[in-house]
Structures are given as structure tokens and as C-alpha cells.
Image (cartoon, grey):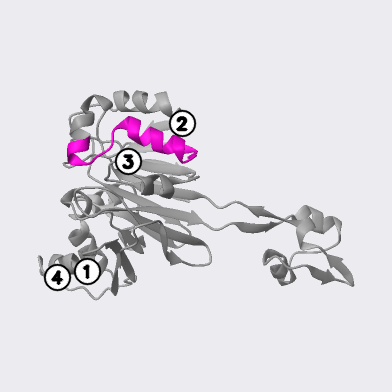
Amino acid sequence: MHITILGTSGMVPTKERNVSGTFLQYKDQGILLDCGEGTQRQMNIAGIKRTSVTKVLISHWHGDHVSGLVGLLQTIGNEKMQPHLDIYGPLGTKKRMEHLMKTCSFDLSTEITVKELTGEKPDIFFENEDFILETALLDHKEICVGYAFIEKDRRKISMDLLRNMGVPEGPHLRSLQEGKSITWKGKKIDCEKVTYLLKGKKIAYITDTVPCENATLLAQNADVLICESTYATALKAKADEYKHMTAQDAALIAQQANVKKLILTHFSQRYETTDELEKEAKTHFPNTVCAYDFMKVNV
């Protein structure tokens, strides 16, 4: 599981920071969290194939989170092998996508499915055999949702134990992976004794919002929390006015939610460096880092 941070700026890009975009690669799934202007160029620089995007998760419809969508769709639409693309977003996303597709003239034969997310509390909106995706409503000036990627626990086989018992590798081990005991040459092989559960990883993505219960619930027990940190506490009044978080707010959510690692992003252009924000957050949650464009995280 690989995370690439494509943009770390707030409302407008700067020389060093593009606007919001985060790419999560998991097996054959390419999940793009927000798509601000310039996102596909950032993907190109990062060595990420644009057609590897299978899902776009939109937090809200402010321009710094969605204005790169048209360009990305045009690029995908020009590929001979066009993937199916699922686009998820808050209430109103279907209508906004209809308007967006009329702003430019281009041929697009890519099959796109647009789904609106309306759950007020953390709720599963996608599930397959490997992972689930959750969403919940946040508290911003625009209708905004947060997301959580949760990998399912996997049962692993202890091959050393099996070899000592004279059991070779092969398709007969599938039942063990499914949590069932097997019989090999008349001897029962107890699943509980030769397998173990590997805990799945969880990644939470929260932007833009003031601190709220759903932010903490989405982040609960996350291995990695990617969270906005638009201002330092010295500008708390401005953060409240525009419904954004401070570095301290993000750190307290990470602390309350029992998060393992906090990655701050979505920084106001007023900060030439993120030292102040990182220092402030670490006071409350030591395992904090400030993201930078093209930062890669292996989970």
C-alpha cells in the first residue's frame, strides 16, 4: 500500500506546493483523494500513470479540490485501454459533474459512474474482498465528507509449521486461508494452530473541516491520518471563521482517535515553511510530520 501526496497547499498553489491531491495505490486499485488543478501533472512528475486511477473520492466542491478533474478525464479518455472510473462525492456531486462535463469539448468514451454519499455518520459505501471504504459528513462551509480506507484482516499460513508436519504448498491450503481446518493424508490440520490473522491497515483522510465528532470517528485507530492543518493556533479565529483546522486541532483528533501516525497537509500560503505547524502539532501528538509535494509513504 503506497500513498503519494500530490499537493499540500490550501486554497491556491504556491511555487513549492500544489493544491489538494493524494493518491493511494493498493493492488490494482488507484484511489485519488481530491483532484485540484494541476493534479495530473503532479501525477506525471511522480511517475503515476493517470489511467491507473480507478476511483476518485471528492471531499467537497471547492475549486482547489476538484478543478483538475476535467483535464484528468480528458487524459484518461484519450487512452486506447480506458478503465472504468468511479467518482464519489457529497450530495450534489451528480449535478456538478453534469455541469463540469459541459465546460469543455472532448470525446470521452470512458465509462464513468458517479455516486453521491449522504451518510451523516461513518458509513461503508464500498466493499470488496480486500478492503472497505467509509465516509462521514464533516463541518465546512461547503458540504464536505471525509474518508477512511480500511484493509480487511488477512489469514496467513505458517508454512514452516506445515512443512514440519509434512504438508506441502498447493491449492489444498486455500481452505486454511478461509479459516477452515483440513485433512492431509488422514491427519487433521487445525486451522487455528497453523494460521494467524494479519491485521489490516487503515488510512483516514480529513479535509476541510473544523474539529467534529465524525472526524474523530473516521480516524479511529488509523495507522495513518492525513489531516488538514491550514493554520497555526495563533490564527485560531481565522480557522474558525473559514471552518478549517489548526495544527493543534489535528493533533488532538489524532490523540483522541488513537492514531499511529499523523500527516499534516492543506497549508495556508502564508506559511513559507511548515516548521511552526509541525512543532505545534508535536506538542500534543509526537508522531506528526508535515507533508510535502511528492512525499511517498509506504503503509
Q: Residues within 10 Å of mark 2 (few under 14, many from 20)?
A: some
Question: Pointer 4: what residue?
Answer: 106
- The CA span between labels 2 and 4 is 46 Å
Decide: few, some or many residues near mark 4? Use Cα within 10 Å; few <14, some 14-19, many ≥20. Answer: few
Q: Residues within 10 Å of mark 3 (few under 14, many from 20)?
A: many
Q: Disc 2 to disc 1, how far (Cα)?
A: 38 Å
Q: Is residue 78 visible?
A: no
Residue at x 81%, y 54% (from the top left corner): 161
Q: Which one is in front in this view, the residue at disc 4 or the one at disc 3?
A: 3
User: What's the distance in space between the residues labelled 4 and 1, CA to CA?
Assistant: 19 Å
| 194 relative to 208 in the view: left or right | right
Q: Does residue 81 appear in the picture of this structure?
A: yes
Element type where label 2 sits in the image: loop
Left or right placement of residue 97 versus residue 80 in this view: left
Task: Identify which residue is drawn at 46% across, 41% down.
Answer: 257
Using the rendered view, name the quadrant where residue 267 is placed: top left
Residue designated by label 2: 287
In the rendered structure, does residue 106 fall within the stretch colored magenta?
no
Q: Amino acid at mark 1?
A: Lys
Characterize the local packing of mark 1: few (<14), some (14-19) or many (20 or more) Cα atoms within 10 angstroms: some
Precedes in sequence: disc 2 or disc 3? 3
Magenta residue span: 240-261
Instruction: Tell me the residue at 28%/57% (across/down).
Output: 58
Spatial separation of the CA atoms under disc 3 and disc 1 = 27 Å
Of residue 215 and residue 169, the one placed in the foreground of this image is 215
Residue corresponding to mark 3: 211
